[in-house]
Image: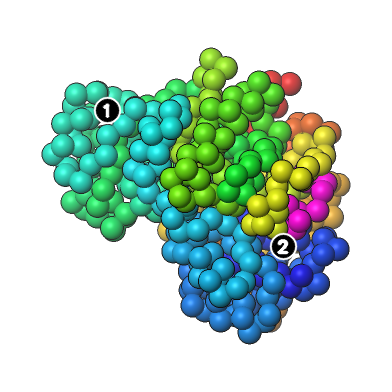
Amino acid sequence: MRVLVVGSGGREHALCWAIRRSPLCEALLCAPGNAGIAETADCRPVAAEDIDGILRLAKAESIDFVVVGPEVPLVGGLVDRLEEAGIAAFGPSAEAARLEGSKGFMKDMCARHGIPTAAYGRFREPEAAKEFVRRHGAPIVVKADGLAAGKGVVVAQSVDEALAAIDQMMAGRAFGAAGDEIVVEEFLAGEEASFFALVDGETALPLIAAQDHKAAFDGDRGPNTGGMGAYSPAPVVTPAIERQIMDDIVLPTVRGMKAEGRPFKGVLFAGVMIENGRARLLEFNTRFGDPECQVLMARLKSDLLPALKASRDGTLSRLALEWSDDAALLVVMAANGYPGPYAKNTLIENVETAAAQQGAMVFHAGTARDAQGRLIATGGRVLGVTATGTDVAQAQARAYAAVDSLHWPDGFCRRDIGWRAVGRG
Ligand code: AMP
Ligand code: GLY
């Protein structure tokens, strides 16, 4: 197969790394990729959001199978366009990607199919949303309906904070058109986890669970980010809870989406809140998580490519995947200042030394080569320093040993990734 991976983050580096190992992969391209991906795939300068450009590239390169990493092209209909052109693609149609692209759509779908999630209201008028907030009190959660790069959620500790968030999203248009409609919902307490299943329209194959750390600083303090680290397994997701997530959340969604004439294919990522031994759905994403994908790929023993193809072909029921018993843990190295403003094009050294540490590998997110071929940082989240080990504690020790052998004075990381899992022993 000639395979094209779409995207440029750590998630896409991990997908390329896994697909490259497949005996079925004859050629591997990535658009646009990054400096790390360029070591395993042939990178082409076409943006992931450029649907016409990706279509042209796939045709020109006689691509057999396209794997779409990020949500924006999925919601924009890239998979529909590729399939119409006769090119097989992994990921949901635009209609099915609304599970991520519209929080209001997702909440209504849960309500129609009895899926456990926070009580909510959908609003197009700020006054009605504020009325709802005053009636319910704090804590309460305000969400922009559309895609906002993971930043469109405010967990408000007071009524005033929630009212201000409504104004910022609706009148202030902090997220543009994504905030023209908002969802206000009940605050759920508990411990969060990320659960993944491959879906082929009819069947769902559970993958494994992971946990990430969304806050920028140690102790889960500071502003929310796209994720500062991740690990798997997630001890909070016991076998009983995994079964409950499949039975109460994933399978009713797969059946419901099919019954409504928008069958879901691709990877369904359920962000769940677990309390008193029961998971409730916080949100759906219709793609692999970043950085969760990297720890999943580090633990996957089977060939990824046939699994992605089976999701597209509707043949998942015949597939089983094997996972390593080892744990994997990833520490994000981010540019100083992230998630606020940060410097670009700073020099990163000793990545090879870091990757050579026991059990370690380094996934690139925001990197490029300068004119002299040196590695430079070009984004907020820059590297995902990953390690495997017999348990989360060993993976954590190895990942930080790798971090400490890097030389990048303009970057920082959290020093406590995995603390919940390590603390459980
Ligand atoms: P989302 O983008 O929907 O995943 O929201 C971002 C983060 O906000 C989640 O990972 C949770 O930590 C938090 N969050 C979202 N919805 C709720 C909720 N109803 N109750 C508590 N926390 C939430
Ligand atoms: N790490 C969370 C996400 O990918 O949305």
Is 145 drawn above or below residue 418 in the view shown? below
Q: Say left or right for 165 vs 27.
A: left
Q: Residue at x 62, y 77 (%)?
A: 58
Is 416 drawn above or below residue 291 in the view shown? above
Where residue 159 sits, quadrant-wise, is: top left
Looking at the image, which is closer to me, 256 or 142?
256
Where residue 210 sits, quadrant-wise, is: top right
- The amino acid type of the residue labelled 1 equals Ser
Q: Residue at x 36, y 52 (%)?
A: 146
Q: Quadrant of the N terminus?
A: bottom right
User: What residue sits right under mark 1 in the picture?
Assistant: 158
- The amino acid type of the residue labelled 2 equals Cys
Looking at the image, which is closer to me, 360 or 351?
360
Q: Residue at x 64, y 26 (%)?
A: 243
Residue at the extreme left: 127
Q: Quadrant of the C terminus?
A: top right
Q: Position of residue 45 (x, y in %)?
A: 58, 78
Q: Position of residue 402 (x, y in %)?
A: 76, 49
Q: Which residues are magenta?
A: 299-307
Looking at the image, which is closer to me, 260 or 47?
260
Residue 393 highlighted magenta (yes or no): no
CA gap, disc 2 and disc 1: 44 Å
User: What residue sits right under mark 2 in the picture?
Assistant: 16
Is 264 drawn above or below residue 394 in the view shown? below
Q: Say left or right for 184 vs 307.
A: left
Residue 302 highlighted magenta (yes or no): yes
Q: Position of residue 357 (x, y in %)?
A: 84, 50
Q: Nearer the viewer, mark 2 or mark 1?
A: 2
Q: Earlier in the sequence, mark 2 or mark 1?
A: 2
